[in-house]
Amino acid sequence: MTICSYGQGEKRKNYFPIWTFHKDSINIHGISIGLWSFNSEPRLTNTNGIKLELIGIGIGIPLIPRSPIVETDSAFIKLKQEPLSERINGLNLSASGSACHCLTNGLTAGFIGQIHFQVNGMSTSLFMNFTQKHNGVIAALFNDAYYMNGLQVGFSNNGYKTKGLQIGTLGNNADEMNGVQISLFNKSKKLKGIQIGLWNVNQKRKFPLINWNFK
Protein backbone atom coordinates (compact mmCIF):
# COMPACT_ATOMS: atom_id res chain seq x y z
CA MET A 1 0.00 0.00 0.00
CA THR A 2 1.49 3.33 -1.00
CA ILE A 3 0.30 6.87 -0.42
CA CYS A 4 1.84 9.93 -2.06
CA SER A 5 2.76 12.76 0.30
CA TYR A 6 4.45 16.14 -0.02
CA GLY A 7 7.00 17.60 2.34
CA GLN A 8 9.44 20.49 1.92
CA GLY A 9 8.71 20.66 -1.80
CA GLU A 10 9.50 17.04 -2.63
CA LYS A 11 7.25 14.12 -3.41
CA ARG A 12 7.62 11.14 -1.10
CA LYS A 13 5.80 7.86 -0.89
CA ASN A 14 4.49 6.22 2.25
CA TYR A 15 4.52 2.43 2.48
CA PHE A 16 2.44 0.32 4.87
CA PRO A 17 2.69 -2.21 6.50
CA ILE A 18 6.02 -3.56 5.10
CA TRP A 19 8.61 -2.42 2.53
CA THR A 20 12.35 -2.41 1.88
CA PHE A 21 14.54 0.38 3.25
CA HIS A 22 16.83 0.06 0.22
CA LYS A 23 14.45 2.34 -1.72
CA ASP A 24 15.37 6.05 -1.57
CA SER A 25 13.33 8.95 -0.18
CA ILE A 26 10.39 7.06 1.29
CA ASN A 27 8.51 6.70 4.57
CA ILE A 28 7.80 3.20 5.86
CA HIS A 29 5.10 2.78 8.50
CA GLY A 30 5.29 -0.67 10.02
CA ILE A 31 8.20 -2.96 9.11
CA SER A 32 11.15 -2.01 6.90
CA ILE A 33 13.40 -4.85 5.80
CA GLY A 34 16.68 -5.21 3.92
CA LEU A 35 20.16 -6.74 3.95
CA TRP A 36 22.26 -3.92 5.46
CA SER A 37 22.16 -0.16 6.02
CA PHE A 38 25.54 0.91 4.66
CA ASN A 39 25.24 2.94 1.45
CA SER A 40 27.62 5.30 -0.37
CA GLU A 41 24.86 7.90 -0.79
CA PRO A 42 22.18 8.86 1.80
CA ARG A 43 18.87 7.11 1.23
CA LEU A 44 16.78 9.73 3.06
CA THR A 45 14.51 6.93 4.24
CA ASN A 46 12.35 7.01 7.37
CA THR A 47 11.07 4.01 9.31
CA ASN A 48 8.27 4.37 11.84
CA GLY A 49 8.02 1.00 13.53
CA ILE A 50 10.54 -1.84 13.18
CA LYS A 51 13.57 -1.94 10.92
CA LEU A 52 15.09 -5.38 10.27
CA GLU A 53 18.55 -5.92 8.79
CA LEU A 54 18.83 -9.55 7.75
CA ILE A 55 22.65 -9.46 7.58
CA GLY A 56 24.14 -6.08 8.52
CA ILE A 57 27.83 -5.26 8.31
CA GLY A 58 28.59 -5.42 12.01
CA ILE A 59 30.77 -8.45 11.38
CA GLY A 60 33.43 -6.13 9.90
CA ILE A 61 33.37 -3.49 12.65
CA PRO A 62 35.94 -5.20 14.95
CA LEU A 63 38.37 -5.11 12.01
CA ILE A 64 38.36 -1.32 11.52
CA PRO A 65 41.84 0.21 12.20
CA ARG A 66 40.62 3.04 14.43
CA SER A 67 37.51 4.43 16.06
CA PRO A 68 35.17 6.29 13.66
CA ILE A 69 34.22 8.75 16.40
CA VAL A 70 35.24 12.38 15.74
CA GLU A 71 37.63 14.08 18.14
CA THR A 72 36.80 17.80 17.83
CA ASP A 73 33.73 20.03 17.89
CA SER A 74 34.46 21.26 14.37
CA ALA A 75 34.57 17.70 13.04
CA PHE A 76 31.27 16.92 14.77
CA ILE A 77 29.59 20.03 13.33
CA LYS A 78 30.81 19.10 9.86
CA LEU A 79 29.44 15.59 10.24
CA LYS A 80 26.15 16.90 11.60
CA GLN A 81 25.65 18.99 8.45
CA GLU A 82 25.63 15.86 6.29
CA PRO A 83 22.10 14.60 5.46
CA LEU A 84 20.94 11.61 7.47
CA SER A 85 20.83 8.41 5.50
CA GLU A 86 18.01 6.99 7.58
CA ARG A 87 15.79 7.91 10.52
CA ILE A 88 14.32 5.13 12.64
CA ASN A 89 11.55 5.79 15.13
CA GLY A 90 11.08 2.55 17.03
CA LEU A 91 13.26 -0.57 16.84
CA ASN A 92 16.38 -1.04 14.72
CA LEU A 93 17.39 -4.72 14.77
CA SER A 94 20.33 -6.16 12.85
CA ALA A 95 21.71 -9.70 12.69
CA SER A 96 25.40 -8.69 12.92
CA GLY A 97 25.01 -4.96 13.51
CA SER A 98 24.31 -1.82 11.50
CA ALA A 99 26.60 0.98 10.35
CA CYS A 100 25.15 4.14 8.84
CA HIS A 101 24.77 7.89 9.20
CA CYS A 102 21.47 7.25 10.95
CA LEU A 103 19.33 8.67 13.74
CA THR A 104 17.47 6.20 15.94
CA ASN A 105 14.79 7.21 18.41
CA GLY A 106 14.19 4.05 20.42
CA LEU A 107 16.24 0.84 20.59
CA THR A 108 19.00 -0.26 18.24
CA ALA A 109 20.59 -3.69 18.67
CA GLY A 110 23.14 -5.71 16.70
CA PHE A 111 24.95 -8.90 17.59
CA ILE A 112 28.59 -7.88 16.89
CA GLY A 113 28.87 -4.09 16.57
CA GLN A 114 27.19 -0.86 15.53
CA ILE A 115 28.14 2.56 14.18
CA HIS A 116 25.52 5.34 14.27
CA PHE A 117 25.44 9.10 14.09
CA GLN A 118 22.88 9.60 16.87
CA VAL A 119 20.80 7.45 19.18
CA ASN A 120 18.10 8.72 21.52
CA GLY A 121 17.27 5.70 23.65
CA MET A 122 19.31 2.51 23.96
CA SER A 123 22.09 0.99 21.85
CA THR A 124 23.38 -2.49 22.58
CA SER A 125 25.63 -5.11 21.00
CA LEU A 126 27.98 -7.86 22.12
CA PHE A 127 31.35 -6.33 21.19
CA MET A 128 31.37 -2.68 20.01
CA ASN A 129 29.14 0.39 19.92
CA PHE A 130 30.17 3.65 18.25
CA THR A 131 27.83 6.66 18.36
CA GLN A 132 28.72 10.26 17.60
CA LYS A 133 25.94 11.49 19.92
CA HIS A 134 24.09 9.31 22.37
CA ASN A 135 21.29 10.24 24.73
CA GLY A 136 20.32 7.32 26.93
CA VAL A 137 21.99 3.95 27.53
CA ILE A 138 24.82 2.37 25.53
CA ALA A 139 26.02 -1.14 26.37
CA ALA A 140 28.69 -3.39 24.82
CA LEU A 141 32.17 -4.65 25.64
CA PHE A 142 33.66 -1.50 24.08
CA ASN A 143 31.70 1.78 23.87
CA ASP A 144 32.78 5.05 22.27
CA ALA A 145 30.85 8.30 21.84
CA TYR A 146 31.69 11.94 21.25
CA TYR A 147 28.67 13.39 23.04
CA MET A 148 27.41 10.98 25.70
CA ASN A 149 24.46 11.91 27.89
CA GLY A 150 23.35 9.06 30.11
CA LEU A 151 24.85 5.67 30.97
CA GLN A 152 27.76 3.76 29.42
CA VAL A 153 28.14 0.14 30.51
CA GLY A 154 30.89 -2.15 29.24
CA PHE A 155 34.35 -3.63 29.64
CA SER A 156 35.86 -0.32 28.44
CA ASN A 157 34.10 3.02 27.88
CA ASN A 158 35.25 6.17 26.12
CA GLY A 159 33.47 9.50 25.81
CA TYR A 160 34.90 12.81 24.69
CA LYS A 161 32.15 14.92 26.27
CA THR A 162 30.23 12.86 28.79
CA LYS A 163 27.43 13.72 31.20
CA GLY A 164 26.13 10.94 33.40
CA LEU A 165 27.60 7.63 34.51
CA GLN A 166 30.36 5.40 33.13
CA ILE A 167 30.51 1.85 34.49
CA GLY A 168 33.38 -0.22 33.13
CA THR A 169 35.10 -3.44 34.12
CA LEU A 170 38.61 -2.47 33.00
CA GLY A 171 38.56 1.26 32.36
CA ASN A 172 36.70 4.49 31.68
CA ASN A 173 38.09 7.44 29.76
CA ALA A 174 36.60 10.87 29.06
CA ASP A 175 38.06 14.17 27.93
CA GLU A 176 35.29 16.08 29.71
CA MET A 177 33.32 14.24 32.38
CA ASN A 178 30.36 15.59 34.35
CA GLY A 179 29.18 12.78 36.58
CA VAL A 180 30.56 9.51 37.95
CA GLN A 181 33.15 7.04 36.67
CA ILE A 182 33.27 3.53 38.18
CA SER A 183 35.90 1.05 37.01
CA LEU A 184 39.33 -0.40 37.83
CA PHE A 185 40.98 2.53 36.04
CA ASN A 186 39.33 5.91 35.46
CA LYS A 187 40.74 8.87 33.58
CA SER A 188 39.36 12.29 32.72
CA LYS A 189 41.20 15.35 31.47
CA LYS A 190 38.47 17.63 32.80
CA LEU A 191 36.37 16.09 35.57
CA LYS A 192 33.44 17.57 37.45
CA GLY A 193 32.26 14.72 39.63
CA ILE A 194 33.57 11.53 41.28
CA GLN A 195 35.81 8.65 40.23
CA ILE A 196 35.70 5.29 42.01
CA GLY A 197 38.28 2.65 41.14
CA LEU A 198 41.66 1.07 41.77
CA TRP A 199 43.39 4.08 40.12
CA ASN A 200 41.80 7.42 39.23
CA VAL A 201 43.25 10.31 37.27
CA ASN A 202 41.84 13.79 36.66
CA GLN A 203 43.17 17.32 36.14
CA LYS A 204 43.65 17.85 39.90
CA ARG A 205 45.26 14.67 41.15
CA LYS A 206 45.93 10.95 40.82
CA PHE A 207 44.38 8.89 43.57
CA PRO A 208 43.55 5.26 44.35
CA LEU A 209 40.04 4.15 45.36
CA ILE A 210 38.26 7.48 45.08
CA ASN A 211 38.98 10.80 43.39
CA TRP A 212 36.93 13.93 42.81
CA ASN A 213 36.76 17.44 41.49
CA PHE A 214 33.78 19.80 41.65
CA LYS A 215 35.19 23.02 40.19
Image: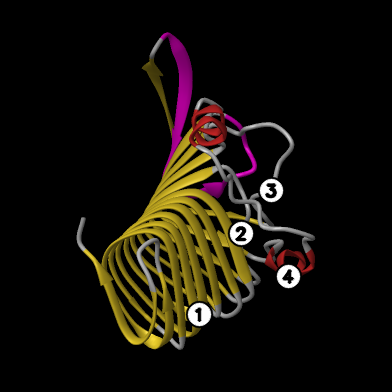
Q: In this view, does 6 lie above or below 58?
A: above
- 132 or 23: nearer the eye? 132
Residue type indicated by callout 3: Phe
Mark 2 vs mark 3: which is more N-terminal? 3
Q: Do the residues labelled 3 and 4 touch (CB within 8 Å)?
A: no
Label 3 neighbour load within 10 Å: few <14, some 14-19, many 20+: some
Q: Indicate left or right for 97 with 169 as reference.
A: right
For disc 2, the marked residue is 98
Residue type indicated by callout 1: Gly
* Residue 171: mark in rendering: 1
For disc 4, the marked residue is 62
Q: Which residue is drawn at 42% across and 84% down?
A: 183
Please state, as top left, top right, bottom left or bottom right, where the N terminus lies in the image: top left
Q: Do the residues labelled 2 and 3 touch (CB within 8 Å)?
A: yes
Mark 3 vs mark 1: which is more N-terminal? 3
Residue 41: quarter of image: top right
Q: Compute the Cα span from label 2 to label 4.
A: 13 Å
Q: Compute the Cα span from label 2 to label 3.
A: 7 Å
Residue 2: quarter of image: top left
- Residue 156 x, y percent position in the rendering: 53, 77
- 22 or 205: nearer the eye? 205
For disc 3, the marked residue is 38
